[in-house]
Amino acid sequence: MTYTESRVLLHAPYGGKEKREGSWKALVEAQKEGKIRSIGVSNYGVHHLDELEEYNKAIGGKIDVGQYELHPWLTRSNIVEWLQKRNIVIEAYSPLVQAKKMDDGKLAEAHLLSPAYTCKSSQCKTPGLPITHVLHSKRKKESFRH
């Protein structure tokens, strides 16, 4: 079977309940038709997830992936717990904090590692598949040093 897309996410819960449900229903239908392998959401709060879970009961859908900004400064434990309880794959974007904390050093000093490595190490201890994008060659080297 050939898939058009392997994963499609609704980026944010904007637009109101009716529009969220309409968008989600379109993804569920595309998945059932074999056009999409996995469907999910990004940046949904727990109340949006609860709402979508209830709607899924009516249409036979399932959230496969939840994508959130996750790192040592933003753990979102309530959302992570919600997703884990339902065996939903967690994708973590910005695990390196968009390089905004790379010169902070406080967390890294506590672990005696570079800030980038400390963030990646922390990501390995929390659930989620890290999605990283490194632009600076020095930080790329740090990222793979350990």
Image (cartoon, rainbow, N blue to C red):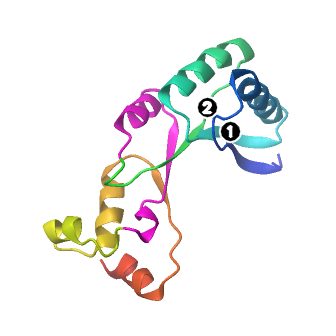
Q: The residue tagged with tag 1: helix, strand or loop?
A: strand
| Front residue of 89 and 26 | 26
Locate residue 54, reporting x and y percent.
61, 15
Q: Residue at x 42, y 70 (%)?
A: 99
- Amino acid carrying label 1: it is Ile
* Crowding near the residue tagged with mark 2, few <14, some 14–19, many ≥20 C-alpha atoms within 10 Å: many
Left or right of 103: which side holds 69?
Answer: right
Neighbour class for label 1 at 10 Å: few (<14), some, many (≥20)? many
Which of 136 and 90 lies nearest the eye of the viewer?
136
| Residue 95, picture quadrant | bottom left
Q: Which residue is mark 2?
A: 63
Three-letter code for the amino acid on which mark 2 is drawn = Ile
Measured as percent of width and height from the top left, residue 115 is found at 29, 71
Along the horizontal axis of the image, is 34 left or right of 84? right
Marker disc for residue 39: 1
Lower sequence index among marks 2 and 1: 1
In the rendered image, the residue lying farthest to the front is: 15
Question: What is the magenta range?
Answer: 75-100
Identity of the residue drawn at 38% across and 40% down: 76
Numbered label tally = 2
Percent x, y for residue 74? 36, 49
Contact between marks 2 and 1 (CB within 8 A): the answer is yes
Hey, which quadrant is residue 108 in on the image? bottom left
| Furthest residue in direction bottom, as rendered | 137
Check disc 2 and report its element: helix, strand or loop.
Answer: loop
Q: Viewer-proximal residue, 34 or 62?
A: 62
